[in-house]
């Protein structure tokens, strides 16, 4: 049995536990729009800054955000900016923020853009999981049949790869590559793999991720998984993978949204998203997983667009998406992309999150 067949067998056994209800427990703190952002090392006009990965580093918040310029083709780069936590606490928006591009497309596997980072601070360095919007060669045609060929006879579109990079203390990147799923002598590259978060953050450790198993026509296989990775080999071990965030009947897809925040000796809080069949709106919830990514508790939707213009309208309407989650004292802060144009910051009390949590295991 191939890796894909084994994973599809696991996927078919997944059962949902959520309800299609929304209780918005977050308040919006601030919005950072692109007109207030100056990109210091690139000359084109910025039109979007969104889907920010974040870490709290001392008194500062470091943000790694997705950037798009002028003609909106989603050929994104990743920019780095620093805020003081006091600015976030008070909801103070500057007249101008300086952002520096630190990651941009360089290879076939991120040629269509570097997207949606999730970041972890480890010994002063940044560990980043992000989406590489990829092209692949025609030698993969049989594996990815049904994908529309574009631009030249030598290239065809592959959905996405799960990419990894490390940044030193000065935030200079060292790019590692992208993950494949392996089992014995077989290697498998899903049509798409994204929406990932580290748990322990070791060289060999557990992550959450969202592989698209099967071909592009298999739309209902987009669910959240865990898996054990080797950062030196850049592999995920198929025999460790389990579905941890099942798709519900009213959703077109689900995925992990944020980095994982440690809240106990073997407990991590992580955001997730679901896209509704009804109006393809993104809505968000929170989950508690253990150190291997197994689900312990989950909420229904607790963060959604309010309906006002700033949250509901943009290049991708009706969406708050990812990518950063921090806990400061007894408050949870969610940094998300607003409709693919701006950064929105939200907060709620940790106790309110726990009140909405449905516990599945001890």
Image (cartoon, helix red, strand yellow):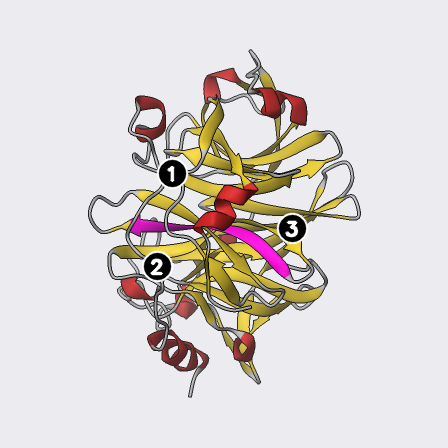
Instruction: Work out which residue is located at the far top of the displayed protein and give it.
Output: 95
Q: Is residue 272 magenta?
A: yes
9 or 349: nearer the eye?
349
Q: Name the residue tied to disc 2.
A: 18
Instruction: Work out which residue is located at the far bottom of the displayed protein and give it.
Output: 1
> Does residue 231 appear in the picture of this structure?
yes
Magenta span: 267-275
Nearer the observer: mark 3 or 1; the answer is 1
- As drawn, the label of residue 24 is 1
- As drawn, the label of residue 12 is none
Dividing the image into 4 quarters, which one contains the N terminus? bottom left
- Residue 293 place in picture, x, y as percent: 56, 65
Around disc 1, counting alpha carbons within 10 Å, would you say few (fewer than 14), some (14 to 19), or many (20 or more)?
some
Residues under labels 2 and 1: Cα distance? Answer: 16 Å
- As drawn, the label of residue 165 is 3
- Considering the whole magenta stretch, tell me its main secondary structure: strand
The residue located at (33%, 56%) in the rendering is: 253
């Amino acid at each position: 049995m191939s890796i894909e067949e084994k994973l599809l067998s696991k996927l078919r056994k997944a059962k949902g536990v959520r309800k299609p209800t929304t209780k918005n427990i977050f308040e919006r703190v601030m919005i950072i729009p692109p007109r207030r952002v100056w990109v210091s090392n690139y000359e084109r006009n910025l039109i979007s800054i969104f889907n920010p990965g974040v870490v709290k580093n001392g008194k500062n918040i470091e943000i790694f955000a997705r950037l798009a310029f002028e003609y909106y083709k989603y050929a994104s780069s990743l920019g780095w900016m620093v805020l003081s936590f006091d600015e976030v606490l008070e909801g103070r928006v500057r007249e101008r923020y300086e952002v520096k591009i630190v990651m941009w497309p360089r290879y076939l596997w991120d040629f269509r853009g570097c997207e949606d980072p999730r970041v972890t601070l480890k010994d002063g360095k940044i560990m980043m999981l992000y989406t590489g919007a990829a092209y692949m060669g025609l030698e993969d045609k049989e594996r990815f049949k049904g994908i529309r060929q574009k631009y030249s006879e030598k290239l065809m579109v592959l959905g996405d790869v799960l990419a990894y990079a490390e940044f030193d203390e000065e935030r200079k990147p060292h790019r590692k590559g992208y993950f494949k799923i392996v089992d014995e002598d077989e290697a498998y590259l899903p049509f798409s793999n994204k929406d990932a978060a580290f748990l322990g953050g070791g060289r060999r450790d557990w992550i959450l991720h969202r592989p698209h198993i099967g071909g592009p026509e298999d739309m209902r296989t987009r669910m959240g998984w865990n898996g054990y990775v080797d950062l030196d080999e850049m592999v995920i071990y198929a025999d460790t993978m389990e579905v941890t965030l099942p798709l519900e009947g009213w959703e077109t897809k689900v995925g992990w949204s944020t980095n994982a925040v440690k809240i106990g000796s073997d407990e991590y809080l992580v955001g997730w998203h679901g896209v509704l069949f009804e109006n393809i709106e993104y809505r968000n919830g929170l989950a508690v997983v253990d150190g291997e990514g197994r689900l312990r508790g989950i909420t229904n939707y607790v963060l959604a667009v309010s309906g006002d213009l700033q949250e509901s309208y943009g290049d991708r309407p009706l969406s708050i998406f990812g990518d950063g989650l921090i806990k400061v004292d007894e408050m949870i802060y969610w940094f998300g992309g607003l409709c693919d144009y701006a950064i929105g910051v939200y907060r709620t009390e940790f106790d309110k999150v726990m009140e909405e949590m449905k516990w599945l295991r001890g």
